[in-house]
Image: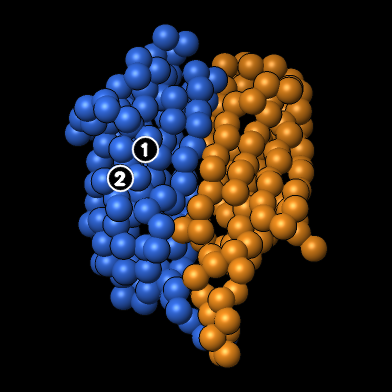
Chain colours: A orange, B blue
């Protein structure tokens, strides 16, 4: 159901600053909305996002209900070596999702 | 509420104005998804880098929007995301640098269609 969109440049020069764009499809239900019968809709959000570059954590975020649906997060890193980016999203009701991307550094 | 949330992050440290830049549209038509970029002036070297960026709001049900943890490997002290705004209000971005100092900026945003917190579905 859930799916991730990741944008990492396939190639980069060593030392170059690259932009990483991530989007995870998720409703991000705030927990403040009510149904027509007045029942509170339980909160269901992604609470944590991390990015690892060849195993080392380079970026982490705590998310709150004020993050819009389908959290879109972009950040930067220095391309140091060829390898793999691992992305992990963790949320309410046991939500976990992962994705990865590869980069060649010349 | 806003001041308390900022205190929870900064502790007793003095929060100085400057270094942080918050790019967000001043007039928002749809509060359900508002693009936002925070950039911090920093050389991003192993000795002098941005440790974290925290974004707060004044009038949503919760004062926190997001906490973003960077490091010397980030290369650039900048993050972007999309947020929800329940009302016209002030948005505050706080950055912690590697020397432990805190810097902040705030921007007032006018929202014409709020992210409905009491929406009936």
Compared with residue A40, is residue A62 higher up or lower down, i.e. above or below?
A: above
Label 1 with label 2: CB-CB less than 8 Å: yes
Q: Nearer the viewer, residue A77 or B120?
A: B120
The quarter of the picture where the N terminus of chain A appears is bottom right
Element type at mark 2: helix
Picture coordinates of residue B28 (x, y %)? 33, 67
The quarter of the picture where the C terminus of chain A appears is top right
Q: CA distance from mark 1 to mark 2?
A: 6 Å
Residue B109 visible in the current orientation: no
Picture coordinates of residue A52 (x, y %)? 68, 29
Checking the image for residue A18, the label placed there is none
Q: Quadrant of residue B99?
A: top left
Q: Chain of mark 2?
A: B
Compared with residue B94, is residue A2 higher up or lower down, i.e. above or below?
A: below
Picture coordinates of residue A71 (x, y %)? 58, 55
Picture coordinates of residue B92 (x, y %)? 30, 47
| Residue located 59% across and 74% down the image | A41
Say which residue label 2 marks: B4
Compared with residue A42, is residue B50 higher up or lower down, i.e. above or below?
A: above
Q: Outermost residue, left direction?
A: B17
């Amino acid at each position: 159901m859930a799916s991730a969109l990741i944008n990492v440049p396939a190639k980069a020069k060593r030392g170059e600053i690259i932009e990483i764009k991530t989007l995870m499809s998720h409703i991000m239900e705030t927990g403040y909305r009510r149904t027509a019968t007045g029942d509170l809709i339980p909160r269901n959000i992604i609470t944590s996002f991390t990015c690892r570059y060849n195993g080392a954590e380079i970026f982490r975020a705590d998310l709150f209900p004020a993050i819009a649906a389908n959290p879109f997060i972009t950040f930067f890193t220095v391309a140091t070596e060829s390898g793999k980016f691992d992305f992990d999203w963790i949320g309410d009701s046991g939500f976990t999702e992962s994705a990865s991307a590869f980069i060649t550094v010349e | 509420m806003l001041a308390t949330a900022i205190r929870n992050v900064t502790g007793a440290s003095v929060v100085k104005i400057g270094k942080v830049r918050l790019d967000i549209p001043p007039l928002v038509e749809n509060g359900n998804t508002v693009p936002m970029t925070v950039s911090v002036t920093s050389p991003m070297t192993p000795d002098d880098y941005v440790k974290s960026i925290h974004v707060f709001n004044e009038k949503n049900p919760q004062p926190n929007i997001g906490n973003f943890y960077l490091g010397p490997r980030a290369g650039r002290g900048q993050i972007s995301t999309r947020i929800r705004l329940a009302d016209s209000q002030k948005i505050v971005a706080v950055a912690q640098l590697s020397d432990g100092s805190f810097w902040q900026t705030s921007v007032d945003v006018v929202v014409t269609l709020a992210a409905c917190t009491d929406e009936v579905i």
